[in-house]
Image (cartoon, rainbow, N blue to C red):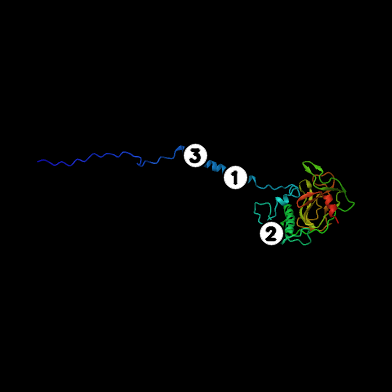
Amino acid sequence: MSVPLSPQLPPTIAPRPTSKTTRPVAPISRVQSRRTKRHWAKVKALGATLAIGVMMTGAAFPGLNPLSDHTAAASAAAAVSTTADSDSQSYTATDEIRAEIAPRGAFAATTPEEIKETRSRAVTAAVAAGMPLSSAMEIPLADRVVMPMADGTYSFTDGFGASRPGRSHLGQDFAAPLGTPINAAMKGCVSRSTESFEGYGVTIQIESIVDGKAVSTVYSHMTYGSRAVEVGDCVEAGQYIGDVGSTGYVFGSCLHFEVHLNATPVDPLPWLTENVT
């Protein structure tokens, strides 16, 4: 008896790869990896450059002279502010603050904007010199100007612009014996009163407003222990503030007297000649 045979199946043939056949994804090439690293390196370098630039533009605050190194820094670099944070060394006066310190008298400046600007400059100079803002807001208007020393007690020596190592002389010297009384040249409030201020020695600085201008007067080389006023005190024209001395960088005893109008030093003698009454 014959056994029936199973039908023969054709042999299985593996498909040939075609262009559509899915292939494993190759890992990122070394070239691509290097490009990515170079890109992020450039980003980091740019960030570091910007950070350094920000640090380099930080303000540097001068500390050598009655009015911020005898420049307009008191009005430019030391803007008065009530919103200064713990890292700030300056203030920025707002219109609200300026309105609170409206003048108590007649001004050469007559418009509200001019009055605000003049008062702001006076407050700025006072705060830059170390006067508390609350006291600076009370700076009065000066109604008269007098000589800082009585007639016959002094003689003029070095004047404004006299040569000094590295800079010019920014005031007028009144030569006088030790202990000769010194008086405030006008009504104002004291923004600096110290036994030692760099080359100025014993120094007093007074802030005033005269004819619509912020005026700072500086009295230096005074006698140790003779200061009769402190920061925040307000004085009248002709009021005694201390004695002639020889402290700081000076030869002989004298009063070194400076006048700054809107934070700019001017020759004291012509200014006194024009304004003393």
Q: Which mark is residue 234?
A: none
Badge 3 vs badge 2, beta-carbon distance below 8 Å? no
- Spatial separation of the CA atoms under disc 3 and disc 2: 55 Å
- Between 32 and 148, the one lying in front of the other is 32
Residue carrying label 1: 50
Give the x, y percent position of residue 84.
66, 54
Give the x, y percent position of residue 233.
77, 58
- Determine whether, in the image, residue 44 is placed left or right of residue 176: left
Q: Which mark is residue 95?
A: 2
The mark that comes first in sequence, 3 or 2, is 3
Badge 1 vs badge 2, beta-carbon distance below 8 Å? no
Residue at 72% over, 49% down: 73
Quadrant for the C terminus, please. Answer: bottom right
- Label 3: few (<14), some or many (≥20) within 10 Å? few
Quadrant for the N terminus, please. Answer: top left
- Spatial separation of the CA atoms under disc 3 and disc 1: 23 Å
Give the x, y percent position of residue 271.
83, 52
Q: Is residue 148 visible?
A: no
Residue 124 position by quadrant: bottom right
Q: Which mark is residue 35?
A: 3
Element type where label 1 sits in the image:
helix
Q: Is residue 33 visible?
A: yes
Element type where label 3 sits in the image:
helix
- Spatial separation of the CA atoms under disc 1 and disc 2: 34 Å
- Label 2: few (<14), some or many (≥20) within 10 Å? few
The mark that comes first in sequence, 3 or 1, is 3
**Three-letter code for the amino acid on which mark 3 is drawn:** Arg
